Image (cartoon, helix red, strand yellow):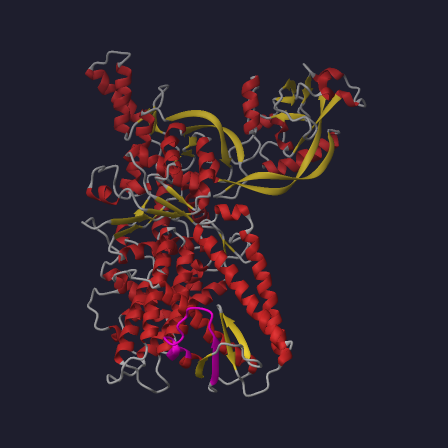
Amino acid sequence: MSISTKYNPAETEDKWYSYWLSKKFFHSEPDEREPYTIVIPPPNVTGVLHMGHMLNNTIQDVLIRKARMQGKNACWVPGTDHASIATEAKVVAMLKERGISKKDLSREEFLAYAWEWKEKYGGIILEQLKKLGASCDWDRTRFTMDENLSDAVIDSFIHLYKKGNIYRGIRMVNWDPSAKSAVSDEEVIRKEVNSKLYYIKYRVSSSGYQEEEAKNFLTIATTRPETIMADSAICINPNDERYLHLHGKKVYVPLINREIPVILDDYVTMDFGTGCLKVTPAHDLNDYELGIKHQLPVIDILNDDGSLNDKAQILIGEDRFIARKKIAKMLEESGHLEKVEDYKSQVGYSERTDAVIEPKLSLQWFSKMDELAKPALADVLNGDVKLIPEKFVNTYRHWMENVKDWCISRQLWWGQRIPAWYFQHEAPVVAKTKEEAIEELINRSAERIAFSEEEKAGFRIQASEFITQDEDVMDTWFSSWLWPISVFDGFKNPDNPEINYYYPTNDLVTAPEILFFWVARMIMAGHEFRGQKPFTNVYLTGIVRDKLGRKMSKSLGNSPDPIGLIEKYGADGVRVGMLMSSPAGNDLMFDEAYCEQGRNFANKIWNAFRLVKGWEVDRNLASPNQQAISWFENRLNEALSDIEANFKQYRLSEALMATYKLVWDDFCAWYLEMVKPAYLQPIDAETKQITIHYFEQLLKLLHPFMPFITEELYHDELFGERKEMDCCIVADYPQIGNIAESLLKDAESIKGLISEIRNVRNVRQISPKETLPLSVKINSEVDYERWSNIIFKLANISGLAIVNEKITGAASFMVGKDEFFIVLNENIDLEAERERLTKELSYLQGFLKSVDAKLNNERFVQNAKPEIITNERNKKEDAESKIKIITESLAILAR
């Protein structure tokens, strides 16, 4: 192919992605190979690609592409989550634009609109992932409300109900007034907000009307004056001497003058607020527990939308926050408001609608979690499931050891409907279909009454007309916790070839914030329904933040458009940019400059390719580059070893940086410079052939990170003729060969020498074309003769002389233990040389001090790996040697 001067991603990305799809490179079927399976964390069907998705799916694609190249049967299952609350909100908004209200529709009519919305918008994010290069098996795309997946949800509910794990009851839940639905604890986001603390005076009922006496009142401090009408008691600590006179007393609730008791409980902290606590069992979880303990009435004054109901007696129909302001004013006017203070408080917000959560007593369905949690906790503690990084294990353990029952019902229409049926005054029947529910009712009744067949028939007719199904749907997470099983049809066909081959999966890549209400629950479901874990490794990504450390969000306007980034920098550039600074579990401070760096890297690869492709071969030439060739082969193997070690520990950022340095520094900046022929001169055949081989290995190594440019270059004629299915995506991943440590160590000395000579040229403003005489006082075992061709070529020296004494008046520098001298034609500026050496000495003395501090730190020495300790001691020895030689040089200059 013709090579343009600059890499153009737009010309290659769609071409190669379409080609991969057409040749089914992403598709997997069970066979004799080792499977490598990832199931995608299904993004919400409402979603569009954001930076968190970019990071998460780039990591997954790197892992799946590498496994594919290693000969494994790589299967990456994509799909989307129906996202009950978020999707229903989108559909309601769509209907509002059309002038339609949800309350005017039947359930069936609303669901028809919801499916219409899903078909129109639900696949956007998956199409965007293709732009990123995600090599998912799109033939396996799943949706959590597909028929088989929905059946799995219903079946699992029935299974757990029959087992006694699911029950229905009235309990305090997190209520989202915007969605008009319960949400789980994990879907509540705690935010610190600026609030007000209202000090409200309650009159003691037996005090008469001598209001001027302070003891006739007690004062409570609350951030929620709008809930005083729901007060059932005032609680004080029995040991609080300030309130001994209130024991056994009653007080009046301000504004409505309802009498409530003063109760005693050491739950109240005497030194917080006024030491008096208003107890509102219907609107606070802790108050609810106090209410149960003291048998207090529960007065729920809020409607499902957060407005006041008739039990409030005043301001009926007002929104809770408007009511707060009005009641504060009413309290002030009636003399019941002592003062108001500014106050910072933690307030729960719905993750889905951003509405302030209301604690609310509600009749809901719950799943017991204590028994389900035990094997899921054991898996992580014994290492069967590895959390990466390990710092999350303790957090996971704390949550699992204190797990609460899961509220699994939601007051919505979009989702899997609770399979519970109601008939007259009978207890609910849990069954998959209406017909099964009716038969269960007949069987239940038959245990009490002897039914004739005729009576049974009549009962069926009556029940069929009047039986009703529960209106609620299940929590979306109650479907996604089955994801690794249900995507392989593991419920309907529990012994099918695919579930047996692909399950358990290998790696899960997800965000730490869903560790508990998705990852942990998937492990629970795996044990409950398959008897084994669903995956082996959980790679927990960090949060993508902006340069100021703020989490990226639409409201802040600090999140770039991922598709716009891809159009600007290319998918490969963006992938590299995302991975540059994203170690597992640590937040990524995203800067668009990373993507620019990724694009520059692609251009560097492109330009290196143009250089090699442009070399003309003279087959009569012998190779002068054996040392360079040998060095790079060993350096490549060393890098492969490091990269593989990073992959095994899921340090993908480090694996990328090792690859980046290998290509940019070692291959482009050093190896190609070592072997390239003089301007307009040919190269020998052996050098070009081995260079092409190295380049091909680098393309394979780069492919998981940068799939598009590598595939494009891989098909160039430079690498020979390619067959239709001979693509980089399925090429053999590079294998690690032998590593000659001494050769690599010497190479670093030679590179250091060349860099120092170039530095002398820069400082002295000597042209690179001017040859320089070089002398060396050798104190090491480096064989400079073996490297002479490279030194002469890259440093442009006229000769290399071995000396036994220092050369006075020459420019000198240290490389390792060896001291080098360049005798310049000009008179050396002794003062400038003295200043340079003094600065270098000062730096080395500071460096030595820092190394000594580490080695003298007993904790560091005890905990660090042996190779790290050895490395630090080598640093110390090297620094001391250099300090000695510089000190001697300064002494000579002082004569």
Image location (x, y in percent) of residue 585: 46, 49
Residue 207 in the figure: left or right of residue 687: right
Image location (x, y in percent) of residue 376: 37, 35
Numbered marks: total = 0
Residue 782 on the magenta span:
yes
Please state which of residues 237 and 177 is positioned toward the viewer in this rendering.
Answer: 237
Residue 781 on the magenta span:
yes
Q: Look at 59% across and 67% down and name the residue there.
A: 841
Residue 313 visible from this viewpoint: no
Residue 652 visible from this viewpoint: yes
Image location (x, y in percent) of residue 151: 28, 37
Image location (x, y in percent) of residue 810: 55, 81
Residue 246 in the figure: left or right of residue 20: right
* Quadrant of the snapshot with the C terminus: bottom right
**In the depicted structure, whether residue 734 falls above or below residue 622:** above
**In the depicted structure, whether residue 816 falls above or below residue 652:** below
* Quadrant of the snapshot with the N terminus: bottom left
Q: Quadrant of residue 852?
A: bottom right
Start-end of magenta stretch:
772-791
Q: Residue furthest front?
A: 804
Q: Residue furthest left?
A: 32
Q: Quadrant of residue 809?
A: bottom right
Please state which of residues 885 and 13 is positioned toward the viewer in this rendering.
Answer: 885
Residue 650 in the figure: left or right of residue 556: left
Q: Look at 31% across and 42% down and name the residue there.
A: 484
Q: Look at 62% across and 21% down and name the residue there.
A: 266
**In the depicted structure, whether residue 461 falls above or below residue 479:** above
Residue 376 in the figure: left or right of residue 442: right
